[in-house]
Amino acid sequence: MRHFGGFLAGLAGLAFLAGAGLASAAPSARTAALPVATTTAPVLDEARPPIGWIDFCRAGNDEDCANETRSPVALQMTSAIWAELNRVNRSVNASVEQVEDTVLYGVQERWTYPNQSKGDCEDIALLKRRMLIRAGVPVQSLLMTVVRDETGAGHAILTIVTDRGDFIMDSKTNRILPWRATGYGFVKRQSQVNPTVWVKLGEPASPGLTVAGQ
């Protein structure tokens, strides 16, 4: 992880921005030009976690896999936080070369952090999640998510649950999109109340939508 120290340093102020530092700002300053996702992905029954996540937790990633029950939290969006989310998304996408697990590790599926700036979709999503958690974003609002992409293939993304709806961080685009605008079919994601529990999702995205470009 030697390539990402600068990202964490650059995000050191995000916890302050997310807290009382902006609480006294005028509403127009906090919410000007912010996007609206309108809805959150509907949660159905409990689901079996992906095998990659199970193995990731068994590998000793206790910081990510703490089996703790928490109250759901939606990230309170501000203009400053929106800018930081976009910066993290772009920085990680630009710094990690996308390489499949079969090439990197000789196995079909392995969830881990990028190794020497290389990794696949879930590795990139895990890194974004960890950076934002360490910067002060509530863990309950940062959910690893499995979808079917525009080709029907399995794909991992990061859902950000906010007070303005669910947004998606994706290794395929630098744009942070409302969940319904990705063109993906949503399968399952982490529960907001416990990161080791996964839940099924309903209402896959409309067939006519496609993943936005850079």
Image: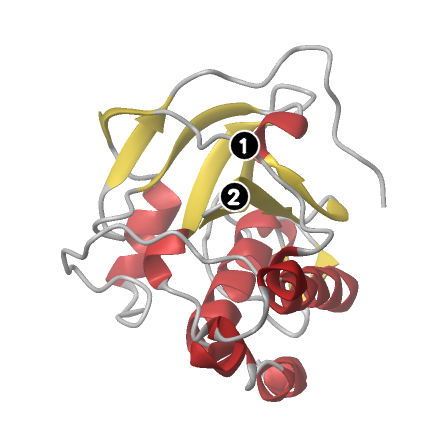
Q: Is residue 92 above or below residue 120?
A: below
Q: Residue farthest to the top?
A: 207
Type of the residue with mark 1: Thr
Question: What residue type is disc 2 on?
Answer: Arg
Horizontally, residue 198 falls left or right of residue 4, namely left
Looking at the rendered structure, the secondary structure element under dot 1 is loop
Q: Is residue 105 visible?
A: no
Residue 138 to residue 74: above or below: below
Q: Residue at x 69, y 53 (%)?
A: 99
Q: Quadrant of residue 41?
A: top left
Q: How many residues crowd around disc 2 within 10 Å: few (fewer than 14), some, or many (20 or more)?
A: some
Residue denoted by label 2: 164
Residue 189 placed where, x, y %? 38, 38
**69 left or right, relative to 173:** left
Q: Secondary structure at mark 2?
A: loop
Examine the rendered structure and indicate whether residue 116 appears above or below residue 103.
below
Compare residues 15 and 125 and report the one nearer the observer. 15
- Sooner in the amino-acid sequence: mark 2 or mark 1: 1
The residue nearer to you, when weighing 25 against 12, is 25
Marker disc for residue 38: 1
Q: Position of residue 17 (x, y in %)?
A: 54, 77
Q: In the current view of this chain or complex, which residue is farthest to the right? A: 214
Q: How is the image coloured?
A: secondary structure
In x, y percent, where is residue 153?
60, 25
Labels 2 and 1 touching (C-beta < 8 A):
yes
Q: Name the image quarter holding the N terminus.
A: bottom right
Q: Is residue 53 visible?
A: yes
Query: Which residue is located at x 15 percent, y 60 percent?
Result: 68
- Marks 2 and 1 sit apart, C-alpha to C-alpha, by 6 Å
Circle 1 crowding by C-alpha within 10 Å: few under 14, some 14–19, many from 20: some
Asked whether 15 or 173 is in front, the reply is: 15
Percent coordinates x, y for residue 101 in the rendering: 57, 50
